Amino acid sequence: MTEKPVNRKGISKTRARFIRESADVRRQALIEATARCLAEKGVAGTSVRAICARAGVSSGLLTHYFDGVDALILATYEDVGVRVSAALEQAVEEAGDDPRDQLRACLQANFRAPILDPDLLATWTAFWSLVRTDPGIAAIHADVYRRTRAQLEALLRAIVPEMPQDRARLAAISLTALVDGLWLEICLDPTTFSAEEAQAMVERAMMLALGQWRGDAGRGDWIDQSDKP
């Protein structure tokens, strides 16, 4: 019986893929541990020792993948921003083809898991505290909000194509500010109002932005004014 030759090339490729995947898993574990440390301890308590203890790894592994804690916090902010954006994009995709439904879904998704999460708030506020002192964090912050506003502007103009660009821009800023304020408050104290009430508030703001809400003696009437300037 003749032995079959060993396919060393195939083994080498498998091993390389395993090493690469393991490296990605370890790097992600450090990012997730950093997010947890930021949520629980704030920026001041997020040290190499705290992160590594949370991730169950040595400090040498952290410095192997990142140039210190600052670089890891930067990567964590980017990762959290990507995950939030992905949740919003998924909500838009699942809303169907109507841009009005897509805009509604995008706004209301902020008041459902995984975005409506007190732990995410704790992590996010830690990032916010660094925006004015860390240029890298400031750049990611600006990019995250720029993409959010651009998405809202595009949806607004898809619903009302004749909406001027400057009006769409201001409407997107207003909607973003409202969502952020409600999200912050409900995460801090969920007894103030419910997620459903928050969604109703952003729904009304959306209709106002589209020129489709008219209050009449304390009573709101839904009307279509999309064809008006």
Image (spheres, rainbow, N blue to C red):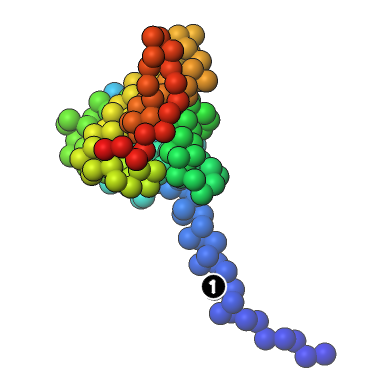
55 and 43: which one is in front?
43
Q: Amino acid at mark 1?
A: Lys
Residue 5, quarter of picture: bottom right
Q: Evaluate whether residue 3 shows in this view.
A: yes
The residue depicted at 17 percent of the width and 30 percent of the height is 132
Where is residue 120? Give x, y as percent. Answer: 43, 28
134 and 8: which one is in front?
134
203 and 61: which one is in front?
203
Q: Quadrant of the C terminus?
A: top left
Q: Residue 6, relative to residue 52: is it above or below?
A: below
Q: Give the residue at mark 1.
A: 13
The residue depicted at 46 percent of the width and 53 percent of the height is 24
How many numbered marks have been drawn onto this rendered protein structure?
Answer: 1
Determine whether the residue tagged by mark 1 lies in a helix, strand or loop: helix
Where is residue 190? Give x, y as percent. Answer: 48, 13
Where is residue 129? Give x, y as percent. Answer: 25, 26
Left/right placement of residue 47 relative to residue 86 reads left
Q: Quadrant of the N terminus?
A: bottom right
Q: Evaluate whether residue 55 shows in this view.
A: no
Residue 163, quarter of picture: top left
Residue occupying the far right of the picture: 1
Neighbor class of circle 1 (other Cα within 10 Å; few <14, some 14-19, many 20+) is few
The residue depicted at 65 percent of the width and 82 percent of the height is 6
The residue depicted at 59 percent of the width and 73 percent of the height is 11
